[in-house]
Every structure is written in structure tokens, then in C-alpha cells.
Amino acid sequence: METGVASSAYRAAPSNILARQRSAAPCRSPSALRSHCLRPSSLFGESLRTTSSWARISTKSRAYSSLTTKCEIGDSLEEFLTKATPDKNLIRLLMSMGEALRTISFKVRTASCGGTACVNSFGDEQLAVDMLANNLLFEALQYSHVCKYACSEEVPELQDMGGPVEGGFSVAFDPLDGSSIVDTNFTVGTIFGVWPGDKLTGVTGRDQVAAAMGIYGPRTTYIIALKDCPGTHEFLLLDEGKWQHVKDTTSIGEGKIFSPGNLRATADNPAYSNLINYYVKEKYTLRYTGGMVPDVNQIIVKEKGIFTNVTSPSSKAKLRLLFEVAPLGFLIEKAGGHSSDGEQSVLDKVITSLDERTQVAYGSKNEIIRFEETLYGSSRLKAGEPVGAAA
């Protein structure tokens, strides 16, 4: 999939491409997962069909490779995934999503950012580029032939992608987190989580087999974590259209960087106000963009820091557990950090509905201890001397 994709990935997708694809009869038999079943497409079918060297590797050899060969900096995405997991269906899905992220990156740089009259069923305003990203991701999942259900923050109902339940996956994604700041040329990104089988409710974030985000800034990067592979891994989009493995993160240490979301909650949440005052008093460096993806990615890349988004009686939770909080929690915890809703890891929260929302903090262990102690008086992560912010 890494070969010869740049030109096709940068072509605009026809507006009706997704509708045409859904009208076609999907391949449902086991043979549907083989490369010869993929039909040519302007973006995904052709490139999957013509660059399927990874698909020709046997399951046995792939499993052997994942156990004996270390994933290395400089690997292509294909090489990394082949070493990191024996699951060829998961490899196929993550490669397909990589194609979509590549195209979205180009479209974000060139698309008009004027608002539209469209709103999704949650009442959020959409920009034209939101829907473009949304359609590209659904298309990628359909052409992977291994996704059973997909659900988007912009289309918050389960969509049948035609893949199998056994050995297949269900994917939830936020197609363009931070789209309201595209016009200011701030960094934005895509978030997605991958669950096994056909369930996206009644599960937890810890049940994910993979999570990822695409970051569209001065560089375009693809951040991936897999359940059975240590660490969180960064891939850089090169000029020729390939993804190259450039960084591993396996630990999040202490460092005075803070990204405080939803500051309006400090008006009637005294504990959150105390926490923010602590950061200021202790001379933390403020690094907050207004976009969740770049602020959380900063913790992974810098290997330190704290991101908070806290609620109050007058400022309710806005971040969605399924589409944003759980996938990013998976990335942070695989990187060696911690997450919290104030009382528990966000990965332990059962997703009861597609629209479930929560407050959250991501960061190093001591920062999460301080967050929990300041907001609730104690932390599940440490007994002994408190490190919370003084009232």
C-alpha cells in the first residue's frame, strides 16, 4: 500500500463515491478479505489491490516476525505493522485508514473553510471539510473489507461496512477534531478507536485492539497504538506519500507543561480553579491550542505534561467517550501515561451510549495524582503524602 499512492491519494473524491460503493454488493465470504476481491477505486480499491505485498505474507510468517523482529525507527508503516501484529485484518484496516489520513491532510491544506448550514444530530455546526473527511474515512473502512460497523461523530449511527463479525472490527471516529480552528490555520486531527467484533456500546476503552490519530499541522503524522505491541508510535508522512516510523513513546515523565481546557468551569468549580492556580503559581508553561488532538499529542511527543477538560454545574461535559476520550486514553496509556475522569481511568468507563460524554485528564502519573486529589480529595494511584494543589 505504500507504493504509488501519492498521486491517487491526492485526487479529490467524487461527492457521490460513498453512495455508489454502498449500493454495490459487499464481499462477505472469507475470500472477500483477499486482495483479488478488491475492486478499483479512485482512492482505496486500486491502491489496495496493486500494493498488496503485505497481504501475501502468510499468517505463520507474520506471527513469527512479530515475535522475533523488533519494530525499528525508519520502518515503513507496512513493515512496522507486519512486525507488530500477526492479525492481517488489523494490518489491512490500519493501512486503509492511513490512506484516508493522507488524503485528508491534503484536503485540510487546500479546502475552503467557510461554514455551512449543516449540523449533525448532536447539534454541532459542521464545516465542509468535516464532511469530506467523514466520507473518506467511511470509504476507507468499507474498502478494507474487515470492518463490520463504523460510527462517526458526524454520523452517530452504526453504519454496516459489510465486513465480518468474526475476525472483523468496529470503528468509531471523529473525522476532524478541531475543525472550528481550521480557518485560523491551527493544527487539527482525526481520532479513531478500533474494537473487535460488532460492538461499540457495552464495551470499554480497554477493549480496543488499536487506536490512532492523524495530525495535520506543519508535519502530517499518524500516531498508532496496538493492544499487544508496547508503546505508542509516530509515523511521518514523507513527500513521496509514504508513512515512516520516526518515534516510539513508552514512558511519560514529569514536566511543567499544562493544557487547560474548558476554563469557564473554574467560575463555579473551585477545585478546578485551585488546580489552575497551582499550575500558574508553580510556573508551568501554558501550551494550549484549543484542539484536543495537538494538545494530547504534545504529551506523547514531549513525553511530559498534563491536559485537562473539567466540568462544572454550569459548564457540562462536551467530550465524547467513544469518539474522542477512549481512543486518546488508549494512546496515552500505551505511551506510559495515565488518564482519569477524576476517579478512574477513562479506559475503564463502560460506553453505554454513542453520545456519552465525560470530563478527562491525560498526563504523567504524578500529574494525574494531583488532578484526582485536587478535584476529589484522594487518588487511586498513590497512598501517602498528597501532591494535590492546596486550597
Image (cartoon, grey):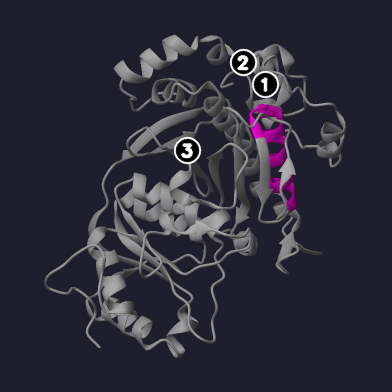
User: Is 112 left, or right, of 332 in this rendering?
Assistant: right
Residue 52 horizontal/vertical position (percent)? 60, 14
Magenta: main secondary structure equals helix
- Relative to 72, say whether 230 is above or below: below
- Relative to 127, say whether 34 is above or below: above
Q: Which residue lies under the disc numbered 1?
A: 47
Residue 151 horizontal/vertical position (percent)? 67, 48
Mark 3 touches mark 1? (CB < 8 Å): no
Mark 2 touches mark 1? (CB < 8 Å): yes
Q: Which residue lies under the disc numbered 3?
A: 209
Camera-nearest residue between 218 and 333: 333
Q: What label does residue 72 carry, if any?
A: none
Q: Residues within 10 Å of mark 1 (few under 14, many from 20)?
A: many
Q: Name the amino acid, label 3.
A: Val
Image quadrant holding the N terminus, namely top right
Name the residue: 16% across, 74% down: 386
Q: Residues within 10 Å of mark 3 (few under 14, many from 20)?
A: some
Q: Name the amino acid, label 2.
A: Thr
Name the residue: 46% across, 52% down: 328
Name the residue: 54% across, 41% down: 195
- Relative to 270, say whether 11 is above or below: above
Q: What label does residue 51 carry, if any?
A: 2
Q: Name the amino acid, label 1.
A: Ser
Q: Secondary structure at mark 1?
A: helix
Marks 2, 3: nearer the viewer: 3
- Looking at the image, tell me whether mark 3 or mark 1 is earlier in sequence order: 1
Q: Secondary structure at mark 2?
A: loop
